[in-house]
């Protein structure tokens, strides 16, 4: 398990390894509550929120 | 006899048949010709699981719900709607509703409550392409159709994992690939779509604008643009070029962390293909630079004349009827027939059509859903009515959203119990796909009639009927005289007459049918102020980050998993939430763990 955190919140998730660019992480939004990590930034024209670039910290969670 | 309907999941809009308790593809439907992915096959198994069956109410959110009848529900709603100031009310609807539902709700709110405090979950997915299409072409609407796939020789998937999210369409592209077409995928993740591509540009997240600007730079420097097309049909070329010269490939390669040669390969594809389709989806849209990313990609098509027989910038829709919602103007600024509340002529026309006094529809767009959440926390919005969507999962900044949901009088109108229901005061059960009739529009502008194949469970009603019932309870009977969904369709279609999305000559029995010609701008006359398409300068803004998290969905699950999550078959391998990280990152976290262990040991020694 890892703890993923941002300035808006934190969640704990099981890690899977895959082919994703270094420094990038992916999590499905349907479960696990990752949207708690997402801030309020939006596109200035469409007012669509940023859901694809969330600056996070990752910590190993000892369990 | 099988009932025909449109798939209730993604925006491809596949035609399906329900017969003998089984779902299969409709061979006669132009979106899929009988093809089908895995998700809808399990629809009969999940459609009755976890349903809301009766209206339920609690004044105090700490108390349990009590079952009530529809008459009591309407009376509670009447009291709330009349007690509170109009601007304190807000409605949040969905691209999973049918067009008839959306139309009646929008009419009730914008026309009869006289507020624009309504938004749709399209704000979280299609709001960006709507803005970009309007800025570039003067109107919303994808310029081409799926048929264009069949003779295209190049495909670019930008921020789209179509192999998972639009599988039936992707199979159609793969068929072309097997016949020699080239496929490029631009994505930080090596998705299934990327693994099938000829070239995967694995860029840093959020740098698409810099990449496309650099491609435009190369097209310009190499003289690979279509000067004649630009002179005749495009404006804004010089301004767009003035911005793109800041992104030579050597610069963009550093910003995007990609190879210079790959940027050239992408530029060559725009320069020399016979017919190129750029498909894009949420990775471009759900971004704080989303409109620029959309426009920067559209710029490449305009600079190379890649429209109609030469290609298309094709935005893929996430939900089954976000297109219908856009046609009906369900965002906080829209009105039916691709109209806008900011346009006086549009307001006057719709007011007159609905039998309202001039000035009833407000000229100021309402707050968007994320702005409304802030207004709820400030106490300005006190009443929220959510229809067919799950804001307790999908909105950003969930901790804040949950506080807002706790604070307001919350109505949740849905077929299923979802996470938002636990914050609700009033639950209204709705009929689900197959239990009601209505139309939906897929990504390529094809309208499909969804026929009924079973009765609504319990006391559930179609969404439009719930709003009709309330309108009658409030004394607006004569404006909502619908006996069935067909009556609603016959009314709403009139508001599209003479518009780009004209379906005024359609009836239920001619569907499925696409509006607009195959090529929306077949004569290269664009509905802008001067008839020309527009290129726009698209500046890129860099954001540093040590770790970038990207959110999306998994292969066999759809959005908040209200239905697909109830199928063991579809959940297989995806039972638990997870975070994907690079294999190469392992050593870094391992190092972190070692450091942590050392700290613990040191602490233990010191204590």
Image (spheres, rainbow, N blue to C red):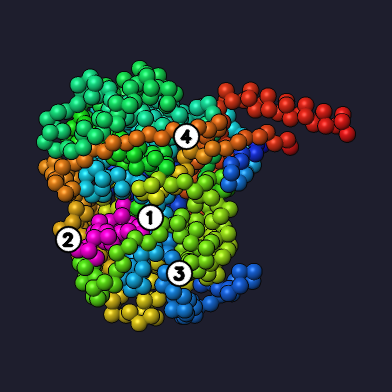
User: Label 3 vs label 4: CA separation?
Assistant: 36 Å
Between the C-alphas of marks 3 and 2, the distance is 34 Å
Q: Which residue is mark 1?
A: B95
Q: Tell me where residue B186 appears, x and y as whole percent.
A: 39, 30
Nearer mark to the viewer, of 3 and 1: 3
Disc 3 residue crowd, few under 14, some 14–19, many 20+, Cα 10 Å: some
Write down the chain letter for disc 2. Answer: B
Which residue is label 4 attached to? B543
Callout 3 secondary element: helix
Residue lying at 21% horizontally and 72% vertically, measured from the top left: B352
Of residues B513 and B99, which is closer to you in this image? B99
Cβ atoms under marks 3 and 2 closer than 8 Å: no
> In the visual, does B358 lie left or right of B186?
left
Of the two numbered discs 4 and 1 on the same chain, state the one appearing first in sequence: 1
Q: Which residue is mark 3?
A: B88
* Quarter placement of the C terminus of chain B: top right
Residue numbers of the magenta segment: B323-347
Q: Which mark is residue B518?
A: none
How much space separates mark 3 and mark 1, taking CA atoms?
24 Å
Nearer-N-terminus badge (3/2): 3
Q: Earlier in the sequence, mark 2 or mark 1?
A: 1
Residue A4, quarter of picture: top right
| Occupied quadrant, residue B274 | top left
- Which residue is the site of mark 2? B497
Q: Which image quarter holds the N terminus of chain B?
A: bottom left
Tell me which numbered mark, 3 or 4, is placed earlier along the sequence. 3
| Residue B481: image location, x then y, percent | 29, 76
- Does label 1 lie on the same chain as label 3? yes
């Amino acid at each position: 398990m890892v703890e993923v955190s941002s300035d808006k919140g934190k969640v704990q998730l099981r890690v899977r390894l895959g082919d994703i660019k270094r420094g990038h992480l992916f999590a499905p939004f349907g479960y696990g509550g990752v949207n708690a990590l997402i801030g309020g930034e939006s596109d200035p024209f469409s007012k669509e929120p940023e859901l694809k670039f969330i600056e996070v910290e990752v910590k190993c969670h000892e369990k | 006899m099988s009932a025909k309907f449109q798939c209730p999941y993604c925006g491809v809009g596949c035609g399906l048949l329900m017969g003998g308790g089984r779902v299969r593809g409709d061979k006669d439907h132009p979106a899929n010709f009988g093809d089908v992915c895995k998700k809808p096959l399990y629809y009969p198994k999940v459609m009755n699981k976890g349903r809301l069956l009766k209206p339920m109410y609690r004044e105090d959110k700490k108390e349990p719900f009590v079952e009530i009848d529809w008459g009591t529900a309407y009376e509670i709603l009447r009291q709330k709607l009349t007690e509170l100031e109009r601007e304190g009310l807000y409605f949040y609807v969905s691209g999973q509703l049918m067009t008839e539902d959306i139309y009646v709700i929008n009419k009730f709110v914008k026309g009869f409550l006289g507020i624009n405090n309504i938004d749709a979950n399209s704000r979280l997915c299609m709001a960006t392409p709507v803005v970009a299409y309007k800025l570039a072409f003067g109107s919303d609407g994808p310029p081409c159709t799926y048929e264009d796939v069949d003779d295209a020789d190049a495909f670019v998937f930008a921020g789209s994992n179509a192999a998972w999210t639009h599988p039936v369409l992707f199979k159609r592209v793969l068929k072309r690939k097997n016949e020699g077409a080239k496929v490029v995928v631009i994505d930080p993740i090596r998705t299934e779509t990327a693994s099938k591509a000829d070239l995967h540009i694995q860029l840093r997240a959020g740098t698409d604008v810099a990449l496309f600007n650099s491609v435009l730079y190369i097209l310009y420097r190499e003289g690979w643009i279509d000067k004649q097309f630009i002179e005749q049909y495009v404006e804004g070329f010089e301004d767009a070029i003035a911005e793109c010269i800041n992104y030579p490939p050597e610069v963009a390669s550093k910003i995007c962390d990609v190879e210079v040669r790959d940027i050239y390969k992408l530029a060559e594809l725009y320069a020399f293909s016979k017919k190129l389709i750029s498909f894009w989806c949420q990775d471009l849209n759900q971004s704080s630079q989303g409109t620029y990313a959309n426009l920067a990609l559209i710029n490449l098509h305009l600079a190379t004349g890649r429209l109609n027989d030469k290609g298309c910038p094709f935005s893929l829709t996430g939900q089954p009827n976000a297109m219908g919602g856009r046609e009906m103007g369900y965002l906080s600024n829209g009105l039916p027939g691709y109209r806008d509340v900011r346009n006086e002529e549009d307001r006057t026309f719709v007011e007159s059509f609905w039998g309202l006094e001039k000035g009833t529809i407000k000229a100021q767009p309402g707050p968007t859903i994320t702005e409304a959440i802030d207004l709820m926390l400030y106490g300005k919005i006190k009443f929220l009515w959510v229809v067919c969507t799950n804001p307790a999962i999908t909105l950003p900044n969930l901790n804040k959203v949950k506080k807002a949901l706790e604070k307001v009088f919350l109505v949740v109108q849905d077929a299923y119990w979802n996470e938002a229901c636990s914050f609700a005061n009033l639950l209204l059960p709705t009929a689900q796909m197959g239990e009601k009739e209505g139309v939906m529009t897929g990504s390529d502008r094809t309208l499909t009639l969804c026929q009924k194949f079973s009765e609504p469970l319990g006391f559930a009603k179609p969404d439009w009927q719930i709003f009709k019932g309330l309108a009658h309870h409030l004394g607006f009977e004569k404006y909502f005289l619908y006996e069935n969904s067909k009556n609603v369709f016959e009314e709403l279609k009139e508001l599209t007459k003479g518009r780009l999305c004209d379906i005024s000559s359609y009836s239920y029995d001619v569907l499925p049918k696409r509006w607009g010609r195959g090529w929306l701008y077949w004569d290269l006359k664009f509905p802008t102020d001067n008839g020309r398409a527009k290129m726009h300068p698209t500046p890129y803004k860099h954001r540093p980050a040590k770790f970038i998290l990207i959110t999306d969905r998994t292969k066999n699950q759809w959005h908040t998993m209200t239905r697909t999550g109830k199928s063991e078959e579809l959940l297989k391998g995806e039972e638990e939430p997870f975070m994907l990280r690079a294999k190469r990152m392992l050593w870094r976290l391992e190092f972190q763990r070692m450091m942590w262990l050392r700290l613990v040991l040191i602490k233990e020694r010191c204590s």
